[in-house]
Image (spheres, rainbow, N blue to C red):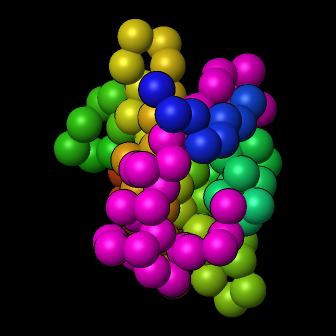
Amino acid sequence: MDIYFEVKTQSGKIIRTTRSHWELISKTKHPEIEGKETEVKECLSNPVEIRRSSEDNDVYLYYHPYEKYFICVVVRYLNGEGFIITAYITDKIKEGSIAWKK
């Protein structure tokens, strides 16, 4: 696996992404996140809130302030490992149960 970066969260879990998946996110799905790897890592390591997806109990949404918006990093946990599904900039925190709040 071609790990592009991995981050240890405040709970001690490791979340990672591959270079090819990061390129898919940042160049195709959410070009506004291109070049913002540092901000995404900060979001994972120092979120202001983590919400559990209302549709999938294994998916969590990490939020961190970015300018007047939030960076949201969507993560799936599988067999104790975390993988970035997507990342984007949003104007508000989405619905879902609060898993952790600063």
- Residue 39 counted in the magenta span: no
Residue 102 visible in this rendered orientation of the protein: no
In the displayed structure, 80 sits above or below 13; it is above
Residue 65 in view in this figure: yes
What is the x, y in percent for residue 23?
A: 45, 61
Towards the viewer: 1 or 30: 1
Question: Which residue appears farthest toward the bottom when viewing the image?
Answer: 68
In magenta segment, residue 24 = yes
Identity of the residue drawn at 65% across and 41% down? 5
State left or right for residue 11 relative to residue 53: right
Q: Residue at x 51, y 48 (%)?
A: 19
Q: Nearer the viewer, residue 92 or 24?
A: 24
Pick out the residue farthest to the left.
55
| Residue 82 percent coordinates (x, y) | 50, 28
The image shows residue 29, relative to residue 73, as above or below, that is below
Residue at position x 51%, y 83% from top? 32
Where is 59 relative to 30, above or below?
above
Horizontal side of residue 96 vs 82, given as left or right: left
Displayed quadrant of residue 35? bottom right
In percent of width and height, residue 21 lies at: 40, 50
Residue interval drawn in magenta: 9-37
Which residue is pictured at 71% across the width and 51% down the height? Answer: 41
Which residue extends farthest front?
A: 2
Q: Quadrant of residue 12?
A: top right
